[in-house]
Structure formats: C-alpha cells, structure tokens
Image (spheres, rainbow, N blue to C red):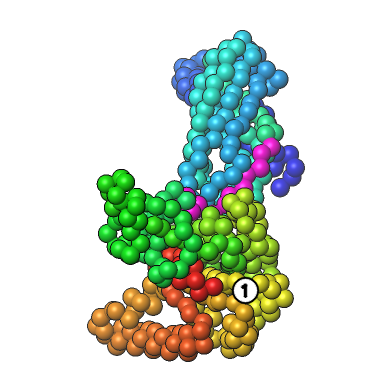
Amino acid sequence: MTKSSKSLWARFLFQDRGILPTKRLILTYLVLTIFLSLGILRDLSWWFVFMVNIVVFFISLADLLFSAKKTQLFFKRTITEEMERGLIYLITIEIRNNSPYSLNYRFIDGLPQTFSKPFPVSGRVLADSANVITYNTVPSERGKYEINKLYIRYQSVIGLWEKQITVELPDTVRVIPDLTETKQYLENGQHFLLYEGLEIRKQQSGVGEFSKIRSFVVGDDPRKINWRQTAKLQEVMTNEYEPEHGKYITILLDCGRMMGAELKKGNRIERALEAAVTVAAAALQKGDYVSVLAFSNEIKTFVPPAKGMAHLQTILQSIYHLKVDAVESNYAAVLQYLEMMQKKRSLLLLFSDIQTFLHEENALAYLKRLRKRHLFFMIGVEDRTLLNRTKAEPIDVQATMLKSIAQQQMLYKKREKNKWERQGLPMIEAREEKLAVTAVSHYMEIMNQNLL
C-alpha cells in the first residue's frame, strides 16, 4: 500500500485530516442520478446533465466555504491522572467555536485499547460559543498510558461536506490497582474485619498498650471495664488496648507464570496487588514499617521499609505497573536477596500460588534459616476448579477419573502444607473475593498476639 493510499484509508478510518462527503451529499447525488437517468431515457440532452452536475458540485463547494476553519476551533481535555483498574471514570472534552457558523461534530478520543470506548461521541456547538461533552471510560489493565490525539469531524452549514482534523492533546494516565477494599478498611477497619469474623480488639489479655476508653460491647473482656468512667457517665465503659507499633512488615509479591491464572474478576496478580495494598495501608495506619518486594525469576522491584501513610503512595507508584512474567518464580533467589536486605525481624507476608510453592524444596531450606529471625506467612487464592472437581458427581468413567485426580491433588497439597507448617511456616488459601480481608485479618491476629 502506497503512502497516499494509506493516508486516504486513514482518513476514512476517522484518522488523519482532510475533507469527506457526508451521507447527505451522497444521497443528493444518488437521487439526482436517478432522475437524470430517467431523463436521458426520455431524450434529455447530455449537455443539460453535465451542467446540472456542475451546478450541484459548485453549490456543495460553496457550502464548504461556510464552515469553521481549524484555527477557529479550540479543544481541551480534562482527565484524571490516576485511575483505578475496573472503575468508571468521567472524561470531559471542551470544544470552543470562534467562527460565525454553527456546526455538528463527532469525535473519537485517542484512548488506549485497554480502555472502554463509547465512540464516536456527537453533538452541536453554536457560533461563537463553547460546548462541554463528557463520556465514561473503564480502564481494564494497569500501567502508564499516553493519550495524545483527539480526532474530530464537523459538518458544513448545509451538511454536504465533513471536515476532519486531528488535534494534539497530550495527557498521561496511570492505571493503578483497584483500591476499593483499601478505602473500605481505612473508612471503617472494624467493620471490614468483622466481615471475616475477626475483631481488631481481639488480643491476649494484658498485652498491648492503652489506646482509649470506649463503650462496652458484647464480647469485650469484663476485666477491662473502667469502673470510674462507668460511674461517671452512667454507662458501661471499657479500656481498649492495642498492639505495640513500629514493627516491620515485608510484603512479597510473586509475579511468576502461575499468578497469571484468570479468575472471575481479573487474575491472581490483580487480586494479590489489591490485597497487598490493603495490608500495607492497615500496617502503615498502625504505625508499622512496610517494605514491598516483587519478583519472578529475578527481583522486579524493592521498596525499602518506611512508615506513615505517605509511604503508601511510594508503594503504589512502585508496583502499579507490575505484570506477570511467562517464567517460573525463583523463590530461592528472592529469599536469599531478602536475607541480605532485611536485617530487622519482620513479618514476611508472601502472596503466591501455594500449589507451585510446595514443590520448592530449595525454598524450604532458605525459609528454615529465615525462620530463626523472621516470621513467615503465606497466602494464596484457592483453586476453585480443583475444588469443584473434588465435589463433582462421578456420573461416568471420565468424571470419576477427574474427581479421583483432583482428590489426589488435594491430599498432596494438604500433606505438604502440614509438613511446612510443622516447620513453623504457615500458609492458607482464600477465596478470591476475600483475599484482602483474609490477609488483613491474619496480619491483625499476628500483631494482636505479639507474635512478631
């Protein structure tokens, strides 16, 4: 395809720039052709046919002159610089028409392929006025994207011709993980954890620092009732204690091949990122130090430990673009790296695929050594397909075989998990929609019991 033909093809694909006939002009010529053809059958002269076509053509050109010029149109895009994956966002396009002619327009914004696109968007802007148009989009993949162009088509006064222009409107958008669960925890952490059946205040008796005095609720320890405040306020009040702050939490994110397995909503790495950010927010809010290490067959990123809610933005900017690598994870290498980088005792919270991790005998040797200094805990997404296979009815030979193999896999996983847990290396699996809740609940349980 030659350069000129590519340019012409791009023009018809709502790209490039130029002038195109509208459906009104094509329909006009179609009707005119039918009438002139009937006239030719009745001895209408070819000279008359030629003159009619010339007149209609020049009328259409005159209509083209009564349309806005490119220099008389101004465009502005307003877009959020940071979006969360899977959520709906509003984008605003402002069109200012400084010409003396009203115009009908259509436009296509230059969004990436991973964004939903409700295009073309159409409207009308009057002479010497401005129009603001909004449309919704949903980003489906994390990452950093450049949005540079806006493709516009607008018609002349009668609407026989359509001008097409391309406007440069550079914007940068970062798509980060869905923070819905993180916001739910920050708004009401007690309610967030009660969904899992664990309360923040649950801890060993007499352990922790005094936090505040609050109203007594069902389930509180009667030994912690503050009788002085109870007599003063005529309401049963209790002392609330909280764990010591300033502990170190290290979140390990597996970005290997198995983390790309698709789930009902996204894949494993998406769920792991959302849960990791929620755990980080919970730990930072409690005054703990949080570090994050992402890996596959090599170290992808490492965020040094720090505390304070401002550190959450540092973590987000470091991990929002992480993708799954088509390689096997090297657990031994990352644990060896962690042994050098993390000198202080910390909670190692690993998000990975348990089925794959159980086959790593080298990782077990490193973890035994790390266990002397750190506290290890692993969490993964349960395999619903495997669970459904174990519960399936053996209606035929094939179904029976699949059920027996699935049960064998479950027994192997249970046996291996018990072996690791006897070494002081606990691991659990959670449903994909409860991964963040389960992770935060176990973090709270570990901190409340002063295991770290």
Query: As displayed, is residue 46 above or below residue 178?
Result: above
Residue 246 on image: x %, y %: 59, 62
Circle 1 is placed at which residue position? 345
Compared with residue 269, is residue 312 higher up or lower down, i.e. above or below?
above
In the image, residue 249 lies at what x, y percent? 58, 66
- State which region is magenta: 170-185
Element under label 1? loop
In the displayed structure, does residue 218 sit left or right of residue 104? left
Q: Position of residue 408 (x, y in %)?
A: 39, 89
* Quadrant holding the C terminus: bottom right
Q: Is residue 90 above or below residue 194?
A: above
Residue 104 screen position, x and y as percent: 53, 21
Tell me, yes or no, if residue 449 can be seen here: yes
Residue drawn at 69 percent across, 42 percent down: 6
Mark 1, other Cα within 10 Å: few <14 / some 14–19 / many ≥20: some
Say which quarter of the image contains residue 307. bottom right
